[in-house]
């Protein structure tokens, strides 16, 4: 495995996180630098370095992960007004942690184009 990431430390309970959802496959917690009233990160407990690395995973794993992202958004009560899901990949995509993570952003209107 490559370098230890902040998400590895959160999963190992070495660094605290404001957890909003956890099961055997994913952990969801509040972003420490929120960009919206609701800003949650959803990470798989299995280390997947980036979005493109999902190609090597089973359809069942990817489908389960995506369904868990939707479940977290639903449990946060975001389905009514909507929300944005963001995956950053690589340097140009501003990925800062080499562990795939979905950003769930909600609680306000979003603008377009992003970034």
Image: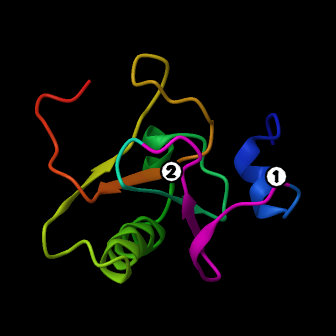
Horizontally, residue 109 falls left or right of residue 46, namely left
Question: Which residue bears the numbered disc 1?
Answer: 9
Q: Quadrant of the C terminus?
A: top left
- The quarter of the picture where the N terminus appears is top right
| Residue 32 covered by magenta stretch | yes
Q: Is residue 35 left or right of residue 113?
A: right
Whether tag 1 and tag 2 are in contact, CB under 8 A, the answer is no
Q: Quadrant of residue 66?
A: bottom left
- Magenta region: 15-34
Place residue 23 in its image quadrant.
Answer: bottom right
Spatial CA span between label 1 and label 2: 15 Å
Residue placed most toward the observer, 31 or 8:
31
- Residue assigned mark 2: 101
Farthest right residue?
14
Above-or-below relation of 95 to 76 = above
- Circle 1 — which element? helix
Q: Quadrant of residue 96?
A: top right
| Residue 107 position (above or below residue 97) | below
């Amino acid at each position: 495995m490559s370098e230890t990431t902040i998400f590895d430390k959160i999963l190992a309970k070495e660094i605290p996180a404001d957890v909003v959802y956890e099961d055997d496959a994913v952990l969801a917690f509040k972003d420490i630098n929120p960009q919206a009233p609701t800003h949650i990160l959803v990470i798989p407990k299995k280390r997947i370095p980036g979005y493109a690395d999902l190609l090597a995973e089973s359809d069942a794993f990817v489908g389960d992960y995506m369904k868990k992202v939707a479940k977290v958004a639903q449990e946060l009560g975001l389905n009514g007004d909507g929300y944005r899901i963001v995956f950053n990949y690589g340097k140009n995509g501003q990925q800062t942690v080499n562990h795939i993570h979905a950003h769930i952003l909600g609680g306000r209107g979003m603008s377009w184009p992003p970034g």
